[in-house]
Image (cartoon, rainbow, N blue to C red):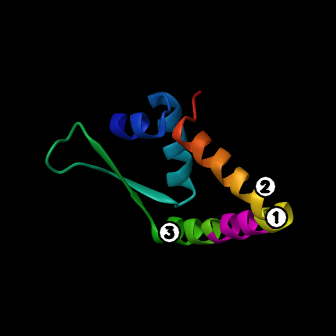
Amino acid sequence: MSVLADEVEMKLPALSKLIDRMVGSALVQRAQDPVDQRRVLVYISDIGLEKHRLLRHRVRRTRHDLETRLGDERGRELRRLLEEFLRHPGA
């Protein structure tokens, strides 16, 4: 969990609560590592995969709609700004 918390830039208690909610919604499954009992492994479930697929499609459609409305030049600028934001989320 600490590796995941670092990766997603969340504090461990907040991530643990989020994972608990995701387990409760059947989006992920949690299990102890069979090799190292101190570690917890998190796996995406079939329901989680389907939810991800649907959300990914919705994000792509929304992004396309925005770029179409903005036109070529402003659409490129939006992409550049979003990519910069994703590279430096805490800045």
Q: Depth check: give the residue in front, 89 or 74.
A: 74
The residue that appears at 48% across and 29% down in the rendered structure is 13
Q: How far across and how far down the image is residue 30, in percent?
A: 38, 52
Q: Nearer the viewer, mark 3 or mark 1?
A: 1
**In the rendered structure, which amino acid carries the disc numbered 1?**
Gly
Q: Depth check: give the residue in front, 23 or 5.
A: 5
Residue under label 1, please give it.
71
Quadrant for the N terminus in the image: top left
Residue under label 3, please give it.
49
The residue that appears at 49% across and 37% down in the rendered structure is 15
Could you tell me if the residues under marks 2 and 3 are in contact, i.e. CB atoms within 8 Å? no
What stretch of residues is rendered in magenta? 57-65
Residue under label 2, please give it.
74
Q: Secondary structure at mark 3?
A: helix
Q: Nearer the viewer, mark 2 or mark 3?
A: 2
The residue that appears at 66% across and 68% down in the rendered structure is 60
What is the CA distance from the residue labelled 3 to the residue labelled 1? 33 Å
Q: How far across and how far down the image is residue 70, in percent?
A: 83, 60
Q: Secondary structure at mark 1?
A: helix
- Main SS, magenta region, reads helix
Q: Earlier in the sequence, mark 2 or mark 3?
A: 3
**In the rendered structure, which amino acid carries the disc numbered 2?**
Arg
Q: How far across and how far down the image is residue 78, in percent?
A: 72, 51
